[in-house]
Image (cartoon, rainbow, N blue to C red):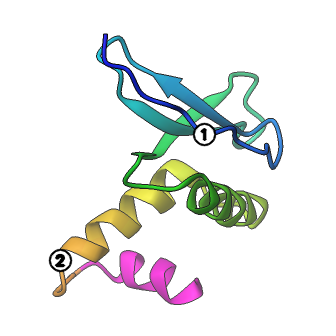
Amino acid sequence: MPSFRIPTIPWVSSALSVKVSTTGKVSFVVRFRYDGSRNTKRVVIGSYPRMSHQSARTETERLRGRLEEGHDPRIVRRLRTRASGDQDLGNFAVRAVMRQE
């Protein structure tokens, strides 16, 4: 197993966590409940060191804000990822979500 240091994360809330795979990949995960669901949902927001823990905290707060507005963070994240990779999006819904941010 590779030797590396994982930074200590000052937790914003119980929503942000770190997942370490068996290969040593470190991923930031946001946990949430959506639309009255009893089950906790998860979305991976990035991996270390490509995303810093401060960026993970910022992204967690942004997604939680969207959740409070009634948007599913998994869909918000997916739309943002697609929009950043494709300049000519023909889907009005994607453009509307991106404009609200």
Q: Secondary structure at mark 1?
A: loop
The amino acid type of the residue labelled 1 equals Pro
The amino acid type of the residue labelled 2 equals Asp
Distance in Å between CA atoms under marks 2 and 1: 33 Å
Lower position in the chain sequence, tag 2 or tag 1: 1
Q: Position of residue 79 (x, y in %)?
A: 38, 65
Q: Is residue 93 magenta?
A: yes
Q: Residues within 10 Å of mark 2 (few under 14, many from 20)?
A: few
Judged left or right of residue 95, residue 6 is right
Q: Position of residue 7 (x, y in %)?
A: 60, 39
Name the quadrant containing residue 68.
bottom right
Q: How many marks?
A: 2
- Circle 2 is placed at which residue position? 86
Residue lying at 81% horizontally and 35% vertically, measured from the top left: 14
Main SS category, magenta section: helix
| Cβ–Cβ under 8 Å for marks 2 and 1 | no
- Circle 1 is placed at which residue position? 7
Judged left or right of residue 17, residue 87 is left
Report the front residue among 47 and 36: 47
Judged left or right of residue 32, residue 43 is left
Q: Secondary structure at mark 2?
A: loop
Residue lying at 69% horizontally and 38% vertically, measured from the top left: 8
Instruction: Using the image, determine if residue 62 lies above or below residue 40.
Output: below
Report the front residue among 8 and 81: 8
Q: Residues within 10 Å of mark 1 (few under 14, many from 20)?
A: few
Q: Which residues are magenta?
A: 91-101
Report the front residue among 41 and 7: 7
Q: Is residue 54 magenta?
A: no
Rendered-image quadrant of the C terminus: bottom right
Q: Position of residue 98 (x, y in %)?
A: 46, 81
Question: What mark, if any, has residue 76 been given in the picture?
Answer: none
